[in-house]
Amino acid sequence: MTSVYAGVCVAILVVMALALARAFSAPTVYDRILGVNMFGTKTVLFIAVVGYLMGRPDFLDIAIVYALINFIGMVAVLRFLEHTAPLE
């Protein structure tokens, strides 16, 4: 059963790499923000799975805090862009 969770961790890492590739190669700022947000969401999932795999339930608390920081950061960036981005 441990090998299944290890495989899930590898799959999540691949998806995280794809999210970063999307964030770096996106045509617009909003697509880049979406890629970074997707990377943050997959990071939360990765932390939770690794915590379960290692038998450390306190990793779930870390994942929840990271999710809150990710959400607040995205809201802050979007609010900033709302007031500074030129009209398209």
Image: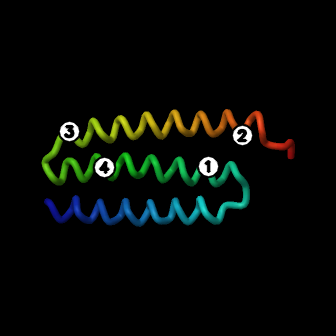
Q: Which sits earlier in the primary sequence, circle 1 or circle 3? A: 1
Mark 4–mark 3 distance (CA, rounded to whole Å)? 10 Å
CA distance for labels 1 and 2:
11 Å
Label 2, label 4: how far apart the Cα atoms are: 29 Å
Q: Label 3 belongs to which residue?
A: 58
Distance (Cα) linking label 1 and label 4: 21 Å
The residue that mark 1 highlights is 33
Residue 88 in percent (x, y) is at 86, 46
Amino acid carrying label 2: it is Leu
The local secondary structure at tag 1 comes to helix
Q: CA distance from mark 3 to mark 2?
A: 35 Å
Q: Earlier in the sequence, mark 1 or mark 4?
A: 1
Q: Are marks 1 and 2 in contact (CB under 8 Å)?
A: yes
Residue where numbered disc 2 is placed: 81
- Which amino acid, by three-letter code, is at mark 4? Ile
**Residue under the image location 35 percent in, 64 percent down:** 11
Which residue is identified by label 4?
47
x 48%, y 40%: residue: 70
